[in-house]
Amino acid sequence: MFAGTFPIITAEEAASHIPDGAMVALSGFANAGTAKLVPRAIAKRARSLHEKGKSYKIRLITGSSSGNDIDEDLAQAEAISWRAPYQNARTLRQQINSQQVQYLDMHLSHAPQTLLAGFFGKLDYAIVEASDITRDGRVYLTTSIGATPTYLKYADRIFIEINAHHSKRLPEMADIVLLQTPPRVNPIPIHDPLARIGYPYAVVDPKKIIGIIETNEPDMIDPFAAPDWKSNRIADHVVRFLFGEMIRGHIPREFLPLQAGVGNLGNSVMAELGNNPYIPPFTMYSVTFQDSLVDLMEKGKLLGASASSLTVTPETLTRICTNMDFFGPRIVLRPQEISDDTGVIRRLGIIAINPALEVDIYGNVNSSHIFGTDIMNGIGGSGEFTRNSYLSIIMCPSTTLGGKVSCVVPMCPHIDSNEHSVQVIVTEQGYADLRGLGPMQRAKKIIENCAHPAYRDYLHAYIRDAKSGHIRHDLKKAYELHRNFLQYGQMLPDLNLAEIGERI
């Protein structure tokens, strides 16, 4: 459709337009639907200019994480000065933690509105992957929606990567609508996960398009590793809890829509739910659609799913696209400010299931910062679902690093979701239902049901000896486990890991 309408240019020509210090938005969400050729050309240009002693870095915003073609390659080229709202690349993570790159970790649904409000400054360029574009500016996106519709509307200048690898039928899943700005924001009329309220395309002013870059390559999304025994046991506890809630009448017999975080734990839970004959067929209102959901959908256990991206391996994407008559009506892809909208989450009564790095004995959750200082990836969408869901479940192993680190601690050194939002905590040891419990009751239940046996005596002694109060803490010892690890290499220096190896 675009032939003869917009100039065809190379990725290198596109990169040459982007000056040092520019604010650049790239399409992509959880590594799906990312711009591919132009970010590589920007990295190449940065290396060349740096070799000549010239400064060249951009301010970078995407929908979510963007994989090696964006975050890792640009970081290795030292081409990023500022990044938002999420990342998952090793080199960029190191640069953020060493203060070489400014990083704004934020709730995903907030990013588009924050941008259009002007709090990030002017958006100079957007580079967007699409399967097609019309002469009047309808842009048909590929495997993700993310924040791309917002970037297309508000960027001063646009480059479009037309990727011939992707099926032209992918837009059948797209449901794109932009929210109004305050104070004229209407309620989002979604009363079912599969409800469609928008259009299969995004819109751009054709006069802003500088050029089209032609590509032909898949999203590079690696499969998740097979779940280990801890993940399987955590999944079993989650499913047992949900089945019990259904039996008690706390969950209706037709069940409630689910949201699951990205990764092995989320995949394990979804597989366990799919294999359990007592869990009825269900829907999802989530952020990403992952490989594990395809089997569930084909066998009728997953009735339909709303997400912001198809975060699937190339083989799975081919499987979906060759059977679009089946998958097309059952998958809805939305902008992230819709898929993560707190009002919709609360209205639908979502059951949210998200991973964490660590939890503390009162139910606070750290999902983003190791030892409270070093960013891992970011909060992503987990905080929005944890705060607003009908049921919020947090999962993590009880220990890591061979038992050297307890993931249940007296006080989290960084908190992403606090005890007011978290209802259930699950480790491979068991689960703690915290609803209706005061702080001391929560602490005792988390220690007994979720902490590893090797750490329970320490945690019980901590609350026994702590200063009296509504929430009991000893501020001299609150981070003793973390300090011990930094000094001795394990949180309990006298713990014989060899003796408890089987239990770890």
Image (cartoon, rainbow, N blue to C red):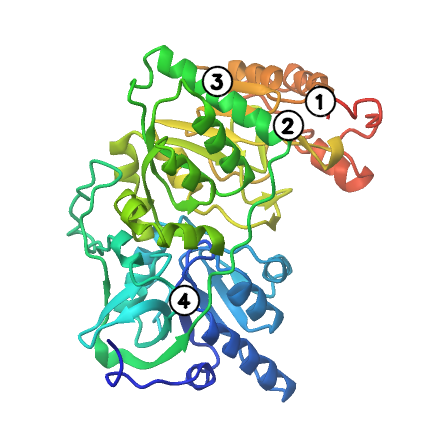
Alpha carbons under labels 1 and 2: distance apart:
9 Å
Numbered mark located on residue 165 in the image: 4
Q: From the image, which quarter does the N terminus lie in? A: bottom left
Report the side of 176 relative to 362 (left or right).
Answer: left
Quadrant assignment, res 178: bottom left
Q: Which of marks 4 and 2 precedes in the sequence?
A: 4
Residue 398 numbered mark, or none: 2
Label 3 to label 1: alpha-carbon separation: 25 Å
Q: Earlier in the sequence, mark 1 or mark 2?
A: 2
Q: Is residue 475 left or right of residue 366?
A: right
Q: Secondary structure at mark 2?
A: loop
Furthest residue in direction top, as rendered: 248
- Given residues 269 and 446, the one toward you in this image is 269
Vertical placement of 469 versus 103: above or below? above
Under circle 3, the secondary element is helix
Disc with the residue nearer the chain's start (2 vs 3): 3
Question: Label 4: how many residues lie within 10 Å, few (<14), some (14-19) or many (20+)?
Answer: few
Q: Nearer the viewer, mark 2 or mark 3?
A: 3
**x 32%, y 23%: residue:** 255
How far apart are the alpha carbons under marks 2 and 4?
43 Å
Q: Which residue is mark 1?
A: 455
The residue at the point 61 percent across, 15 percent down is 448
Which residue has dot 3 on it?
Answer: 240
Verify CB contact (< 8 Å) between mark 2 and mark 3: no
Tell which circle, 3 or 4, labels the residue nearer the N-terminal end: 4
Mark 4 residue element: loop
Number of numbered tags placed on the structure image = 4
Please, what is the three-letter code of the amino acid marked with disc 1? Tyr
Q: Amino acid at mark 3?
A: Arg
User: Distance between the Cα atoms at labels 1 and 4?
Assistant: 52 Å
- Marks 3 and 1 in Cβ contact (< 8 Å): no
Which of the two discs, 1 and 4, labels the residue nearer the N terminus?
4
